[in-house]
Amino acid sequence: MQNIVLFGPPGAGKGTQAENIIKKYQLVHLSTGDMLRNEMKNQTELGLKAKTLIDQGLLVPDEVVIGMIKNQINQNLQAKGFIFDGFPRTVAQAEALDKMLAELNLSIHSMVALEVPFNTLKQRLLQRAKELNRTDDTEEIIEKRIQEYNSKTLPVADHYKKQNKFYSIDGVGTVQEVFERIERVLQA
Ligand code: B4P
């Protein structure tokens, strides 16, 4: 079973590349961003609480996303592997993920980190704002999301570096070029 963490700042292309990876490797795609947007669309209690945080560029509490991921893993125990997209985003989430996988005799195989400069991230997200109308893709909120990433999410890379599971990928180029770089890591 190959379990992969797809890592990177907002707009790095995690969701975009996850689509390519699941098509090729038939892994189960677990995106906490998609799960939260689904809750928001259905106006559930969780979705309404998450929206107030997401619209300020803030992270949703650890226990909420950890619970969602645990649920999805347990519903997909027959999977060939999982691709974690946008999760873990804090060290506490990474520790919880390691623990829940260990209880199932599983582990993370690799963290694939997409590296993209700040200005490119901003351009991509402002472009996406025009296409998808996401309320968290305004200039002010993008900057807050990147600050949150730098303070709370970047340390997650060290967590996997210590385990020798960290692979840095240049995330600038066409979607296909970036995918080919990821494939080289996954096939190694
Ligand atoms: P996410 O949904 O995870 O979104 P993201 O970081 O904005 O985007 P991603 O990196 O997937 O970018 P994409 O492929 O779409 O999170 C949204 C929010 O939910 C967070 O801010 C947070 O509040 C909350 N949340 C989610 N998970 C959480 C957690 N675990 N804990 C706490 N809170 C959590 O790419 C962006 C754009 O770039 C797209 O328009 C795409 O077409 C374009 N693009 C991609 N690759 C490109 C390329 N190579 N060249 C040009 N454009 C490209």
Image (cartoon, helix red, strand yellow):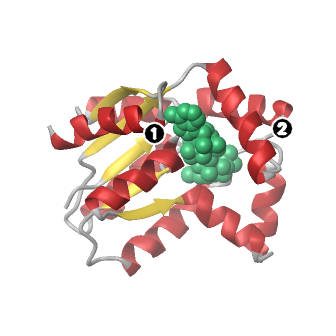
What residue is shown with label 2? 138
Residue 28 visible somewhere in the drawing: yes
Q: Secondary structure at mark 2?
A: loop
Q: Residue at x 75, y 48 (%)?
A: 131
Query: Marks 1/2: CA distance?
Result: 22 Å
Residue 12 visible somewhere in the drawing: no
* Number of numbered labels in the structure image: 2
The mark found on residue 7 in the picture is 1
Quarter the N terminus occupies: bottom left
Q: Quadrant of residue 163?
A: top left
Q: Residue at x 26, y 40 (%)?
A: 183
Query: Which label's residue is closer to the chain start, 1 or 2?
Result: 1
Q: Residue at x 45, y 36 (%)?
A: 156
What's the residue type where badge 1 is placed?
Phe
Q: Position of residue 170 (x, y in %)?
A: 41, 24
**Vertical arrangement, residue 84 with respect to residue 187, above or below:** below
Q: Secondary structure at mark 1?
A: strand
Q: Would the CB of label 1 be found within 8 Å of ligand 1?
A: no
Q: Position of residue 187 (x, y in %)?
A: 17, 42
Q: CB atoms at circles 1 and 2 under 8 Å apart? A: no
